[in-house]
Image: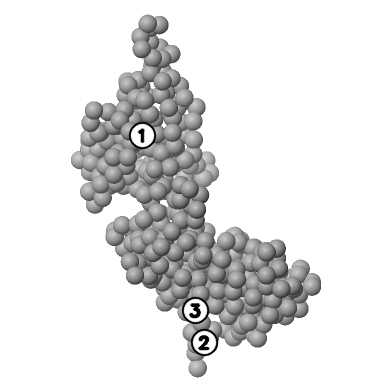
Amino acid sequence: MSDIYQQRRQALLAELPENSVAIIAGYQQKVRSKNIKYHFRQDNDFLYLTGFEEPDAVAVLVKHDSCKYLLFCRPKDIAQEVSFGERAGTQGAVSIYGADKGYNIADLEGTLLPLLNKTKNIYINDELGRFAAQIVNWANHQRHHCSFDTPKQFTSIKPLAELLHQKRVIKDENEIKKIRKAVKASVAGHIAVMRACKPGVNERELSSLFDFTISKGGCNDVAYPNIVAGGNNACCLHYEQNCCELVDGQMLLIDAGGEYEHYAADITRSYPVNGRFTTEQKVIYQLVLSALDQAIAKVKPGASWNVLYETCMQVMAQGLKELGLLTGSIEEIMATESYKRFTVHKTGHWLGMDVHDVGPYHDQQGHWRQLEAGMVFTIEPGIYIPLNAEDVPEAYRGIGVRIEDDILVTVSGFENLSAEVPRTVQQIEQLMMPV
């Protein structure tokens, strides 16, 4: 496994100019309450390049006359390890994680400064600004501390993300394998929730059931806080309270995905609490599903990213017009974007180590990026009609429908990784209300 991280570091170093140093900061553990800490979760960029999961670490990639990988981490400490778990230490940084040399994190500045004094380019990846106060001083150290007649080193500071995040957009086979496992566990979680959904059940019960089910599929955590939203709660896009009792006649929207070995799934399904769609619920649901399916059908290498959004908006705008919820010609509706009243959000994002994974959606000329094999992303159209939309017929109010699938671009087209979660009205009703 360490070979994967070595290959990633080498590929990144190959793109850096000579006399460069890249500094990649890991996360530190955060306090939850007094002496109780939150469960630690490493920075994804740091993980992508190192595989190192301990807090308070920094990776340094050096490209001078040769390339080196230095890993700064906590030293071995028997007393701390008895209480909080084993540490790799500086020797483990080399023997386990492939560093050319391991250092005590306390020695970071003292070790870095001699390196940076000979460096023309510093690439920094420090998501939380851990070294924001020091980085400029580090870059200027040589010229501020050398004698007046010594040649000065003027060092530039650049974001590493511009190079690194480009690489994370295309997933390798190992990454796709992990995403598949996250999706498989999440599929089981969604099916379990769908079967358990009924009037009188609390949203939090279904959220907990999802967590329990994905744990049996190998997931240690969710990729993001579960959204389990009954009725009008679904019209809040990032509803996280999950505290209300489900009511007969309402719809439920559940947006939830597990995380398997730091790779995310992200799946949304919407269905009636009692297992049977009303006429109005079915019409809105079918409209969203049609938008999703028509967008998925556009996925292939060479397709423009934005065609997925445009397809969804065209389908949903036409349907909302036919229902009388939007007025004017379809040309006017599209030109004025009046459909946004009910559609609200974009219809997808990259998926990987981050649920909203990193990487640009435009090329260097500012055009929408073209799809390539190995990309993984969501497509997630939605229609939301809140209770306070008093100009809308009452039977449509309080309905929020979002349907989201996880899509892999293949050489010949696409694969819907999450298709096994029931999607059609017939599939949903058969699962929730078997004869």
Circles 3 and 2 in contact, beta carbons < 8 Å: no
Q: Residue at x 43, y 59 (%)?
A: 370
**From the viewer's perspective, is residue 326 above or below residue 75?**
below
- In 3D space, how far apart are the residues under numbered discs 1 and 2 (Cα atoms)? 54 Å
In the image, 294 versus 135, the foreground residue is 294
Question: Of label 1 and label 2, which has the lower sequence position?
Answer: 1
- In 3D space, how far apart are the residues under numbered discs 3 and 2 (Cα atoms)? 8 Å
Q: Position of residue 262 (x, y in %)?
A: 38, 55
Question: Of label 3 and label 1, which has the lower sequence position?
Answer: 1
Q: Position of residue 158 (x, y in %)?
A: 44, 33
- In 3D space, how far apart are the residues under numbered discs 3 and 1 (Cα atoms)? 46 Å
Which residue is label 1 attached to? 22
Residue 423's disc number? 3
Which residue is label 2 attached to? 426
Label 2: element kind: helix
**From the viewer's perspective, is residue 175 above or below residue 85?**
below
Q: Position of residue 168 (x, y in %)?
A: 38, 51
Q: Residue at x 42, y 35 (%)?
A: 124
Farthest-out residue, right? 391
Chosen colour scheme: one colour
Badge 3 crowding class, 10 Å Cα cut-off, few under 14, some 14 to 19, many 20 or more, is many
Q: Amino acid at mark 1?
A: Ala
